[in-house]
Every structure is written in structure tokens, then in C-alpha cells.
Image: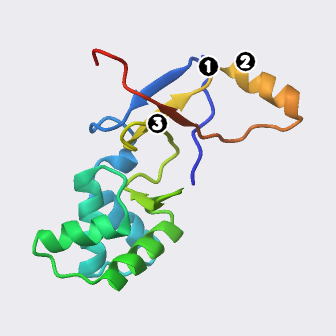
């Protein structure tokens, strides 16, 4: 899975949900995913376009079964095998993300560096763009002896009362 980018010189801690059209250019439309596929020399079959269109329209983390059911409910004729094969090809090429969870794999439309917040009550996953303070990165580097090149955070929590 891609990791969150390193902080800018300002090094402020930020967490911005990316469920809206705000976010990276990589998340704005399935057309960018089509372009990425073409750049990688991937064939854009009808089934592959259906999977990409669904991921970008839902802007959620879905299982292969969810994708299969949603497409077939919409009257889009696609088989289980085709869904799995396309998801695997798209994930392997870095066009989409894949999250491994205890309940199975979930696929998301973003492939750019970002973090996640999981609701422990519902299991819903929210994409976040998080920037850690530069001094925290420096302390981690000092403690570990590693130079941090990239990072990703996985946060878990519950909605606050009144939200």
C-alpha cells in the first residue's frame, strides 16, 4: 500500500478527509484511472471500465463481492472471476488500492499516498491525508536509526457524541 507523503518544511499536523472532490488529482475521476491504465499498457475492457467506474462513483472501500453485486444489481453483466481478475490486475499495477482486513480484501479508488481512519463501531473506512510534524519524524528517525522516506497511518476510533 502506498504511504503518506513526508511533511513540508512547515511540518504541521493535518488530517483532511478526502471523501469530497478535494484531494489529489489522482482521485478526481475514473478518466484519470483510464489514462493510467493506458500509460501502463493495460487493456481497458468493458469489464475493467465497469469496475473502475463503480469504484470512482462509490468512493468507498468495497469487497470484490460488493463490487460484483453492485454491478449486477445495476444491470451490468459481469462474472465473479472477471471482477476478481480485474481487481487483481488494477491493484498490481498500482491503479487502485487494496486493504487486507480480517474480513477480507477491500478495494478503493485511491492509489495515491494516504492514510485511513476505521470506525470501530461500523467498520467504515475513511481516507485521510495526514502530514506529521517534522520534529516527530526526526524523533522517530533518531529512535530507530532509519531515515523515514514515506509513511501511512491507520487510525481507529468512534464518532464523538453529537457529531
Task: Give coordinates of residue 16: x percent, y percent.
Answer: 41, 28
The residue lying at 37 percent from left, 43 percent from top is 124
- 47 vs 66: above or below: below
Q: Which image quarter: residue 73?
A: bottom left
Distance from disc 2 to disc 3, alpha carbons, whole Å, reads 23 Å
Task: Give coordinates of residue 156: x percent, y percent.
Answer: 50, 34
The residue lying at 40 percent from left, 77 percent from top is 84
Q: Which image quarter: residue 81?
A: bottom left
Callout 2: 10 Å neighbours few (<14), some, many (20+)? few
Callout 3: 10 Å neighbours few (<14), some, many (20+)? some
- Give the residue number, with chain letter if any, for mark 1: 11
In this picture, residue 48 sits left or right of residue 145? left
Counting labels gives 3
The residue lying at 82 percent from left, 30 percent from top is 141
Badge 2 element: helix
Task: Give coordinates of residue 29: x percent, y percent.
Answer: 27, 53
In this picture, residue 104 sits left or right of residue 23? right
Q: Nearer the viewer, residue 152 or 135?
A: 152
Residue mark closest to the camera, 1 vs 3: 3
The residue lying at 64 percent from left, 40 percent from top is 151
First-in-chain label (1 vs 3): 1
Task: Give coordinates of residue 50: x percent, y percent.
Answer: 23, 71
First-in-chain label (2 vs 3): 3
- Give the residue number, with chain letter if any, for mark 2: 135
Quadrant showing the C terminus? top left
| Labels 2 & 3 near each other (Cβ < 8 A) | no
Distance from disc 2 to disc 1, alpha carbons, whole Å, reads 8 Å
- Give the residue number, with chain letter if any, for mark 3: 117
- 77 vs 2: above or below: below
| Labels 2 & 1 near each other (Cβ < 8 A) | yes
Amino acid at each position: 500500500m502506498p504511504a503518506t507523503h513526508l511533511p513540508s518544511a512547515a511540518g504541521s499536523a493535518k488530517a483532511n478527509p478526502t471523501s469530497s472532490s478535494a484531494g489529489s488529482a489522482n482521485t478526481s475521476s475514473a478518466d484519470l484511472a483510464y489514462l493510467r491504465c493506458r500509460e501502463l499498457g493495460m487493456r481497458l475492457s468493458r469489464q475493467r471500465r465497469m469496475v473502475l467506474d463503480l469504484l470512482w462513483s462509490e468512493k468507498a472501500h468495497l469487497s470484490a463481492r460488493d463490487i460484483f453485486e453492485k454491478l449486477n444489481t445495476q444491470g451490468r453483466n459481469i462474472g465473479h472471476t472477471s471482477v476478481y481478475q480485474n481487481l487483481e490486475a488494477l491493484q498490481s499495477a498500482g491503479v487502485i488500492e487494496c486493504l487486507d482486513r480480517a474480513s477480507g480484501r477491500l478495494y478503493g479508488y485511491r492509489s495515491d499516498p494516504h492514510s485511513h481512519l476505521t470506525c470501530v463501531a461500523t467498520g467504515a473506512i475513511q481516507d485521510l491525508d495526514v502530514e506529521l510534524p517534522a520534529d516527530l519524524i526526526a524523533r522517530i528517525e533518531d529512535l530507530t536509526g532509519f531515515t523515514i522516506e514515506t509513511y501511512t497511518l491507520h487510525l481507529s476510533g468512534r464518532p464523538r457524541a453529537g457529531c
